[in-house]
Amino acid sequence: MLKTWTLSLIIAAFLLSILGTFLTRSGVLESVHSFTQSSVGPVFLAFFGAVLVASLGLLFARSRDLEAPGALESSICRETAFLFNNLFLVAITFTILLGTIFPLIAEAAQGSQISIGAPYFNRLTVPIGFALLFLMGVGPVLPWGAARLEELQYRLLGPVVVGVGAVLLLLLLGMRGVGALVTFGLAAFVLAVTLAHMSVDVRVRRRNTGERFTISARRLFRANPRRYGG
C-alpha cells in the first residue's frame, strides 16, 4: 500500500537536494556557497536531468511490482494521518520551491526582477504548520486499521479541553495574537496527548514490574524516546 507514493517522495527528496545545490552553487541565486567562476552549475544540472529521467523510467517500469493489494480500511486511522502528514509536508515544500524559483522564472520570461519576501511564506506555510501540529496530537491516538469514532472522541476530549484552557488562560494574561494563541493551544493539545499516552504505558509497566511511577516513566522514555516526543 502506497509503495509508489513512498518511492516518489524518495525520488523527489533527492532531486530537490540536487536542485538546491544547483541553484546555490551555480550562481543562479546569490549565496555564500556560490561558485560563480566555475562550471559546476551545468554539471549539477546535467546530473539532475539524468537522475530525473532514470528515476521516472525505473518507477514506470516497475509500476506493476509496486502495486499493493491492501487498501485503507477506514478514513479514520493512523495510516490516513501519515498520508495527510505527507501531503502537508509536500505542500510546504512546493510553497517554498515556488517562492524560490518564481523570481528566476519571471526574470527569464519578462526580464524584470521581482522579490518574494516573508509575507508570502508566512501566509501560506503557517496554516499548514498548524495542520501538522494538530496531526502530531491526533496521530498517536489513532489506531492502525479502523478506529471507532466514540473511542476517538473519548481519547481526544481531555487534550482538547487542555488546549482550549491554555488559549483561555493566555487570553486572560493579555495575549491577543491569533497565530500565537493557535500555536500555544495546539502545543498544549499535543502535550496533553503525549502525557496521556505515556501515563497509560507507565501504568501498564508498573502493574507488570511493580516499579515506582518516576522510575517507570524514566525507563520508558529512555527505551523509546521517539514514542513520547523525545
Image: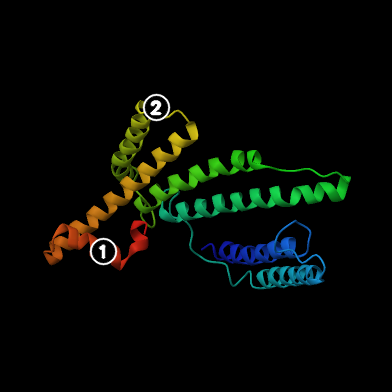
Disc 1 is placed on an element classified as helix
Point out which mark residue 7 bears: none
Residue at point 36% right, 50% down?
A: 147
Give how far across and how far down residue 225 sits, in percent.
34, 63
Q: Which residue ends up furthest to the left in the rendered image? A: 210
Mark 2 lies on residue: 174
Q: In this picture, is 145 found above or below 159? A: below
Residue 63 x, y percent position in the rendering: 63, 69
Kindly identify the amino acid type of the residue bearing the numbered disc 2. Gly
Quadrant housing residue 213: bottom left
Residue sitting at x 49%, y 42%: 130
* Residue at 13% over, 63% down: 211
Inspect the image, locate mark 1, and give the three-letter code of the amino acid beneath it: Leu
The residue identified by callout 1 is: 220
Q: Quadrant of the C terminus?
A: bottom left
The residue most toward the front is: 32
Left or right of 97? Residue 217 is: left
Front position among marks 1 and 2:
2
Give the colour scheme of this rendering: rainbow
Which of 230/131 is in front? 230
Secondary structure of the residue carrying tag 2 is: loop
How crowded pointer 2 is (Cα within 10 Å; few <14, some 14-19, many 20+) is rated as: few
| Residue 17 screen position, x and y as percent | 65, 64
* Pointers 1 and 2 in contact (C-beta within 8 Å): no
Nearer to us in this view, 79 or 15 = 15
Give the mark nearest the N terminus, 1 or 2.
2
State the image coordinates of residue 177 (x, y, percent, origin top left). Answer: 48, 31
Judge left or right: residue 77 versus residue 121: left
Above or below, comparing residue 109 to residue 59 in the picture: above
Q: Residues within 10 Å of mark 1 (few under 14, many from 20)?
A: some
- The CA distance from mark 1 to mark 2 is 38 Å
Q: Which of 142 and 229 is in front in this view?
A: 229
